[in-house]
Structure formats: structure tokens, C-alpha cells
Image (cartoon, rainbow, N blue to C red):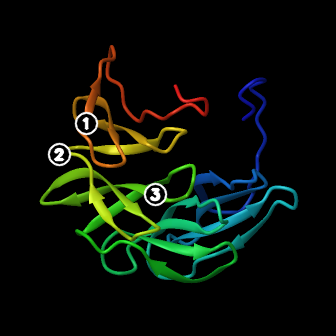
């Protein structure tokens, strides 16, 4: 949908359930989840040709794909027995597992410079916001946990906004203290605008 005119156009006519789209860094492709037989897989769609390319092929649930600036794709999969993050090339291939901590890492989002992946991390029945540094491979839990979800990076990549059981909060990527944001009503699933507000 065009945010200025409101005009909509269909970009995928693939039969099945199409969902969780994510734009490529150059804006010419989408990566999305397509379930045609009850088995969600990751596909890439070239917007010019409207041709979808299947990137994963497994009996597991593959979903929540997002692009890295280098064109590779991070997605959530339970192929190892529990939801974890994996990385795959823009044309497919053998996925590389990225996360090994805890029994649940999902909802990935990538920092603008591609260095960090923020995610929802679960352990002991509590949900946290965690970050993986792709340069050093350091995994760090950033929040005190509870019902922390929906991370989104600020345009400068230094701060993450997220939802928790009380509303919306921010935390720095280097692990500083969380800060609650006072909003009216029941706010959830916050995201940064491209200009930083």
C-alpha cells in the first residue's frame, strides 16, 4: 500500500498463505513466508518479475524472515527442535544456525548497519529482548524479562524500542537500563520512524 495515496497493489499471487513480508535493502525484492501445504517456507519475490523463488525446503516451520544489508536473510526456524535464528544466502542454500542460547529465539530485527540482530529470547517462562552481535558473535540479554517482545532498532542502531507487559520501553544495544515510555492507552508493537522519532 502506498502510504501517501492509499493505493494498494497485490505483489504475490502465489497460492497458499502468504505472510510476514520484509523489504530487501534495495527495495526491489520481498522475502516472505509461504505455506502451500501446511508447511511454512521462506520465499523471495522479485517485484519486477513477480516471480517467487523458494529459499528453504524442510519439514520444519520457517518464518519471520528479514534481510541483512549484504543481501543474506535471517529467519526463525524450529528445524533444530525449538525456534532459533538461522541465516541463508539471497539465493538459498544451507542455512547457518545463529542462536544457541535458551530454547526460544524469534522475531528477529536487524540494525541499520547490519551488525546486530535483536530478538525475543525466552527462558524460564519469561520473554526478554536479546541482541546478537554478528561481528563478535556475542549474545546478550538486554531486558529484565517478563513479556518483552516486538523489538525495533532506532535509525542510529544504538537503541531498541520494544513492548512489555506494561506498555512500551527502550533499551540501549550495549545493555543499559530500560526506560519506560509514558503513553496513553494500551500501546503495543512500537516501531521507529525512518527519521528517528
Mark 2 or 1 closer to N-term? 2
Q: CA distance from mark 3 to mark 2?
A: 19 Å
Mark 3 is surrounded, within 10 Å at the Cα level, by few (under 14), some (14 to 19) or many (20 or more) other residues, namely many
Residue under the point 87% across and 57% down: 48
Left/right placement of residue 107 relative to residue 124 reads right
User: The residue tagged with tag 3: helix, strand or loop?
Assistant: strand
Mark 2 is surrounded, within 10 Å at the Cα level, by few (under 14), some (14 to 19) or many (20 or more) other residues, namely few
Mark 1 is surrounded, within 10 Å at the Cα level, by few (under 14), some (14 to 19) or many (20 or more) other residues, namely some
* Label disc, if present, on residue 144 of the rendered structure: 2
User: The residue tagged with tag 2: helix, strand or loop?
Assistant: loop
How many labels were placed on the picture?
3
Quick one: which residue is furthest to the top in this view? 184
Residue 123: quadrant of the picture: bottom left
Residue under the point 55% across and 72% down: 37
Please name whichever residue, 66 or 62, is drawn nearer the observer in this view of the structure: 66
Please say if the residues under marks 3 and 1 sit with CB atoms less than 8 Å apart: no
Mark 3 or 1 closer to N-term? 3
User: The residue tagged with tag 1: helix, strand or loop?
Assistant: loop
Please name whichever residue, 37 or 162, is drawn nearer the observer in this view of the structure: 162
Mark 3 or 2 closer to N-term? 3
Quick one: which residue is furthest to the left in this view? 124
Q: CA distance from mark 2 to mark 1?
A: 8 Å
Please name whichever residue, 196 or 35, is drawn nearer the observer in this view of the structure: 196
Please say if the residues under marks 3 and 2 sit with CB atoms less than 8 Å apart: no
Task: Identify the residue position indicated by label 1 in the image.
Answer: 178
Left/right placement of residue 169 relative to residue 60 reads left
Task: Identify the residue position indicated by label 3 in the image.
Answer: 116
Please say if the residues under marks 2 and 1 sit with CB atoms less than 8 Å apart: yes
Q: CA distance from mark 3 to mark 1?
A: 18 Å
Relative image position of residue 100 (x, y in whole percent): 30, 75
Residue under the point 33% across and 49% down: 174
Amino acid at each position: 500500500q502506498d502510504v501517501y495515496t492509499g493505493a494498494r497493489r497485490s505483489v504475490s499471487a502465489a497460492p497458499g498463505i502468504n505472510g510476514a513480508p520484509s523489504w530487501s535493502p534495495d527495495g526491489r525484492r520481498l522475502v516472505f513466508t509461504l505455506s502451500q501445504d501446511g508447511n511454512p517456507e521462506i520465499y523471495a519475490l522479485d517485484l519486477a518479475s513477480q516471480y517467487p523463488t523458494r529459499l528453504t525446503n524442510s519439514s520444519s516451520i520457517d518464518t519471520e524472515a528479514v534481510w541483512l544489508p549484504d543481501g543474506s536473510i535471517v529467519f526463525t526456524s524450529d528445524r533444530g527442535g525449538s525456534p532459533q535464528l538461522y541465516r541463508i544466502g539471497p539465493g538459498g542454500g544451507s542455512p547457518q544456525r545463529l542462536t544457541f542460547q535458551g530454547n526460544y529465539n524469534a522475531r528477529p530485527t536487524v540494525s541499520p548497519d547490519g551488525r546486530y540482530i535483536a530478538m525475543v529470547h525466552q527462558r524460564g517462562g519469561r520473554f526478554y529482548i536479546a541482541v546478537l552481535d554478528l561481528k563478535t558473535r556475542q549474545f546478550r540479554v538486554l531486558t529484565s524479562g517478563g513479556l518483552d517482545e516486538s523489538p525495533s532498532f532506532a535509525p542510529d542502531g544504538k537503541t531498541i524500542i520494544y513492548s512489555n507487559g506494561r506498555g512500551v520501553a527502550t533499551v540501549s544495544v550495549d545493555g543499559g537500563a530500560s526506560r519506560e515510555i509514558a503513553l496513553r492507552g494500551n500501546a503495543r508493537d512500537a516501531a521507529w520512524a525512518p527519521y528517528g522519532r
